[in-house]
Image (cartoon, coloured by chain):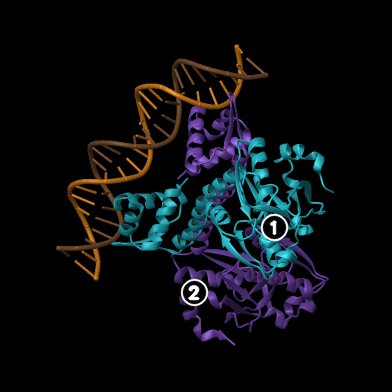
Chain colours: A purple, B cyan, C brown, D orange
Amino acid sequence: MFELAQLEQLLAFAKHKTLSKAAEEMHLSQPALTRSMQRLEEDIGVPLFERKKNKLSLNENGKLAVEFAEKIIFDVHTMPERLREFDRTRRTIYIGSCAPAPMWKLSHELSELYPELALSTDLKGTEEITRGFDIGKYDIIIMPEPTDKTEFVCFNYMTEHLMLSLPPAHPLAMYKEVSFNDINGETMLLFSDIGFWHDICAAKMPDTEFIIQSERDTFRSLVKLSALPSFTSDIVTDQVEEHRIIVPISDKEANPTFYIWIHKSKKSKFSRLCEALKDRISP
Amino acid sequence: MFELAQLEQLLAFAKHKTLSKAAEEMHLSQPALTRSMQRLEEDIGVPLFERKKNKLSLNENGKLAVEFAEKIIFDVHTMPERLREFDRTRRTIYIGSCAPAPMWKLSHELSELYPELALSTDLKGTEEITRGFDIGKYDIIIMPEPTDKTEFVCFNYMTEHLMLSLPPAHPLAMYKEVSFNDINGETMLLFSDIGFWHDICAAKMPDTEFIIQSERDTFRSLVKLSALPSFTSDIVTDQVEEHRIIVPISDKEANPTFYIWIHKSKKSKFSRLCEALKDRISP
DNA sequence: CACAATTACGAGGGTCGTAAAAATG
DNA sequence: CATTTTTACGACCCTCGTAATTGTG
């Protein structure tokens, strides 16, 4: 049986048309290549080359052999790549979420339930999250609505309450609660990595100008230093907001319940999680 | 890079479930297999096995690796087979003919024109010959009719005259010529390997009983010794038929002209033959 | 205790590189 | 005369087999 190295050498020769050049690419001496190709011919049992005194070229057999070799070498190279990728996905839980708060909570719980697995999290709008779920990019997704599709299992995970964070001097600070409509037209500070909240903001407050900040620390400094309103929620408890008035937002869109979707086919992989959530199964 | 031998060893292990059995099939010692599989894991970069103290089994990666390996090893084994077949067809001219006489003539001419190539001849009815031509089984076919298909090139090759060979005492021996109709109902000797002549006989002499003989020498002896009529032709000059009366057959089916068909795509391969026949091209 | 997997170590075979030869444009 | 292919020869690396170890049912 011939060796893979010989097929790669054949491809190198087909590419460079001379043994010397091919040998260079293969980090091999010319004589070694000569013998290696002679062995290949012997092993296969048909002549692959046309030999002139100082010229070697592929004959018809050789040209066909190159086509075979290309396919085999391609498969041989993809095999380890695909296996490594497969191994990686096997050791990682891929989460897609439409909001940060439930993702933090779920990440925390998963890392305790599955300390041997790595987590990969992705924060996007609902549309992109469901698309990624459909193509198998995510094992688990967090959505602001349940699903009744029979191929998914769905859990009621948590509810978040969005609130307005205001400097005490702000006119809205006196209200016990506000609606998106009240805020519409304001200029606001907004953190960028917030998933579907972007869509909510755009839909419910079309006239509001958002000053978007992607650095969390910078965002927090801005909130402290500026007189502009910003959002916070009942989940973001760690965020110290001194000298700010917190006002609940009444709209139902501001108080979403988040649901966890999992493919039924992956139930066994996430049996521990499903067990932990079994009381919250939806519907 | 891993080696093909390692993939085959992996397949052997997948088949036998233990290194010892696999080693036996591979004509290798167990320790050698152990190390070989360890190298395979290293080369690919992911664990393929689940190791218990005295039990080795494939993990999920390993099962996927087996699928890859099966495909690669299959391709590796087919490559030499296909190349040998390709080489053989390249060195052989495959001829299909519906009659023996033009096949002998063509074989003779081809072996002089292409002394470096082997000949493979096949004698069948017209239907089977054209079918074989369509599927590429034959490079050249000999047919009793021309073709006007543009993808073929066609030559008028030769005409053969079928004749009746009779013992002098036979009633038909006095005629200057006969028709198939005159012979219909006789009992006749017939050589078996005669291609489309079988169809002619069956069609034109449905009531004739043919005593079919496949051994040429036996057939000739029978012709000499029996008082039964048989066929001969103007081409079969070497056949000494003492004490036999030769009567021409008048039907047009008994005097066919044979045509050579060649795929235009193979014109270059048979350029010498086409050159030799260029005066007889048949539109 | 038979069997399976793994480790240690020495031997052998195969492939490589260097050197040299032969041929070409 | 630079370039290319091929052959000859010695060296080295790599894999193999034997032997020994550990562990299991």
Which residue is denoted by mark 1 in the rendering?
B173
**Does residue C6 appear to the left or right of B247 in the view shown?**
left
Using the rendered image of the protein, determine whether residue A250 is visible from the camera's viewpoint: no
Q: Residue at x 72, y 69 (%)?
A: A198
* Residue B138 or residue A140, whichever sits in front: B138
Q: Which residue lies under the disc numbered 2?
A: A270
**Whether residue A39 is situated above or below residue A168 in the rendered picture:** above
| Residue B191, numbered label | none
Q: Position of residue A179 (x, y in %)?
A: 75, 80
Q: CA distance from mark 1 to mark 2?
A: 97 Å
x, y percentage for residue A49? 58, 35
| Local SS, label 1 | helix
Quarter holding the N terminus of chain A is top left
Crowding around mark 2 (Cα neighbors within 10 Å: few <14, some 14 to 19, many 20+) is: some
Residue at position x 54%, y 72% in the image: A106
- Check disc 1: other Cα within 10 Å, few if <14, some if 14-19, many if 20+: some
Total numbered labels placed on residues in the image: 2
C3 or B144: nearer the viewer: B144
Label 2 lies in what chain?
Answer: A
Q: Nearer the viewer, residue A36 or B114?
A: B114
The quarter in which the C terminus of chain A is drawn is bottom right
**A11 lies left or right of B172:** left
Under circle 2, the secondary element is: loop
**Residue A78 placement, left or right of B168:** left
In the image, B78 versus B168, the foreground residue is B168
Asked whether, in this view, residue C11 is left or right of residue B14, the answer is: left
Q: Amino acid at mark 2?
A: Phe
Quarter residue A175 falls in: bottom right
Residue found at the far bottom of this picture: A283
Residue type of the residue flagged with mark 1: Ala
- Image coordinates for residue B207, horizontal then vertical, percent: 68, 71
Relative to residue B142, is residue B127 depicted above or below? below
